[in-house]
Image (cartoon, helix red, strand yellow):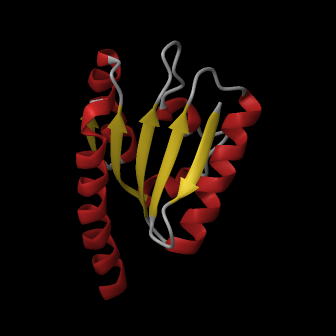
Amino acid sequence: MIAVEQIGQSNIVEVIVKGDCTSSDLDQVARRLNDIIAQQGTICVLENDRATGVVTPMSILLDESRFDFKNRACITHVALVTDQLWLGVFSSSLSKMLAAEVLCFTRLELKQAKAWLKKKSKNSRSKLLST
């Protein structure tokens, strides 16, 4: 299962992954992200990996068939929270694909991940408002 929660009225979006995801789940998430980008201009993503088995990384979610290609540039920062070490390695390739700053955090560092995104969100929004 995968869910998307916008943090209040901010441009921070939490993507919560709990186990296997269906194609329908991914389509719904992509639509929600596109909608939030349309409202906010840019977003910061907290990918909260609570899965213990197979994980669907953001690269699959952001496949061109699901996610508007032009909106990839609207994702400015991604905090990947996981205890699956291979995802940390994967996150470096994600940053190249998105042109976003991507950091990997452990489950114990969830608060730090949220604080990092909050700080980055303010910076990206102030740049957006000044243009």
Q: Indicate the quadrant where residue 118 lies.
A: bottom left
Q: How many marks?
A: 0
Q: In front: 73, or 84? A: 84
Quarter-of-image position of residue 124: bottom left
Give the residue drawn at x 51%, y 12%: 53
In the image, residue 91 sits, relative to residue 47, either above or below, namely above
Furthest-right residue in view? 24
Image x and y of residue 56, in percent:
54, 25
Q: Residue furthest top?
A: 53
Position of residue 119 measured from the top left corner of the image (x, y, whole percent) = 24, 64
The residue drawn where x is 59% and y is 69% is: 38
Locate the C terminus and report the quarter of the image it occupies: bottom left
Asked where in the image residue 92 lies, by quadrant, the reply is top left
| Residue pictured at 57% horizontal, 36% vertical | 61
Residue 14 visible here: yes
Please determine whether, in this image, residue 71 is positioned above or below residue 91.
below
Kindly identify the residue that appears in the image at 66 percent across and 36 percent down: 26
Q: Is residue 64 left or right of residue 59?
A: right
Q: Is residue 84 above or below residue 7?
A: above
Evaluate whether residue 131 shows in this view: no
Depth order, front residue of 98/57: 57
Camera-side residue of 68 and 82: 82
How far across and how far down the image is residue 68, in percent? 61, 52
Q: As displayed, is residue 44 above or below residue 29?
A: below
Q: Quadrant of the N terminus?
A: top right
**Furthest-bottom residue in view?**
130
Residue 30: x percent and y percent? 64, 47
